[in-house]
Image (spheres, rainbow, N blue to C red):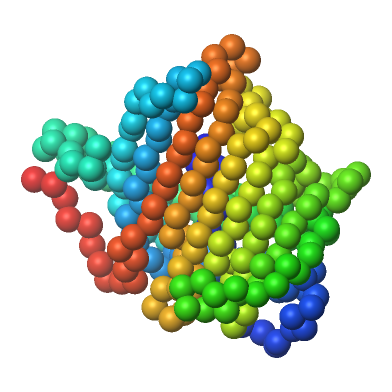
Amino acid sequence: MRWFVLAIWAIVLPVSAQDANEIIRRSVDRDAYNFERLKNYTFLERSEERRYDRDGKLKSTDVETEEILILVGRPYGRLIERDDKPLSEKEALKEQQKMDKELEKRRRESERDKADQDKDRAEQRRFLREVPEAFNLTLKGSEQLSGRAVWVIDAQPKPGYKPKAKRADLLTKIRGKIWVDQMDYQWVKAEVEIIDAISVGLGLLRIAPGGTVRFEQTRVNDEVWLPLRVNVAANARLAYLKKLRAELDITYRNYRKFQTDSRIVEVE
């Protein structure tokens, strides 16, 4: 379910507060700005997955924390904690060896390989540019979030909309509400409800209608908006057989500006 996780949207001319479509269009235009600057930061990503039985009783919980590092210009997640406890020396060494292997692999990549990787990452987010076209957007008013004025915009899918970009068909299967910062035109928060079944991983995982996704961002170093929290709650069917009821909660913290002269210290 991590593919829900999206990292997002910087400053242009003011816009009429009455035009919800223009507000969303300008906020989506900032996607490239934030996406590029995310590569300048290292941070911690904590994922907690909770699974429930048919009666809604908690069956199991898995918690992992990764340190997101920059390897040859691209993010890499190194596992550092499990169930909020540091890895054993053996596990830590294994994770270091995995990272060293990936580092060498990336160093051997040609410029074309690197360009293709960047293109693929950008393609995964291109469907966001269809948001103003795919939804009927309505400005519901203004609120205060974390001391900042935001617009509240309702988003309902347009009947009969034909997606253009890869993965944009997702937009026809959700509805929600978006909170947009009035100064920076950034998505401060979004709440999404799944209204039609969504297939993931070649159709092996189907997420049923009624699932929800909640997303929050925060302003970092007074220059960029970066993810703060993502929550996904859904009923799903795995390989058309096993039914799953799960909730995924991902939190982000310790954003630090990446220094090009930093080096990775090997585990002894």
- Taking the image as shown, residue 1 lies to the left or right of residue 124, namely left
x 49%, y 46%: residue: 231
Q: Residue at 57%, 46% (x, y): give it.
A: 213
Q: Residue at x 54, y 14 (%)?
A: 242
Q: Position of residue 118 (x, y in %)?
A: 56, 56
Above-or-below relation of 224 to 252: below
Q: Can residue 139 be seen by looking at this rendering?
A: yes
Q: Is residue 261 above or below residue 2?
A: below
- Image height of 143 relative to 156, above or below: below
76 relative position to 226: left or right? left
- Give whichever of 180, 260 is nearer the camera: 180
What count of labels does the image hold? 0
Residue 140's image quarter?
bottom right
**Most distant residue in the left direction:** 268
- The outermost residue toward the right is 160
Taking the view exactly as shown, the residue that stands out farthest to the bottom is 13
- Looking at the rendered image, the quarter that the C terminus falls into is top left
Between residues 66 and 52, which one lies in front from this camera angle? Answer: 52
Q: Pinpoint residue 19: horizontal percent, then vertical percent.
A: 80, 75
Residue in front for this viewpoint, 191 or 2: 191
Query: Where is residue 143 drawn, in percent x and y?
Result: 60, 73
Residue at position x 67%, y 57% in the image:
177
Q: Is residue 86 left or right of residue 151?
A: left
Residue 2 higher or lower than 189, as above or below: above
Q: Is residue 201 visible?
A: no
Residue 100 picture quarter? top left
Residue 173 position in % (x across, y down): 74, 41
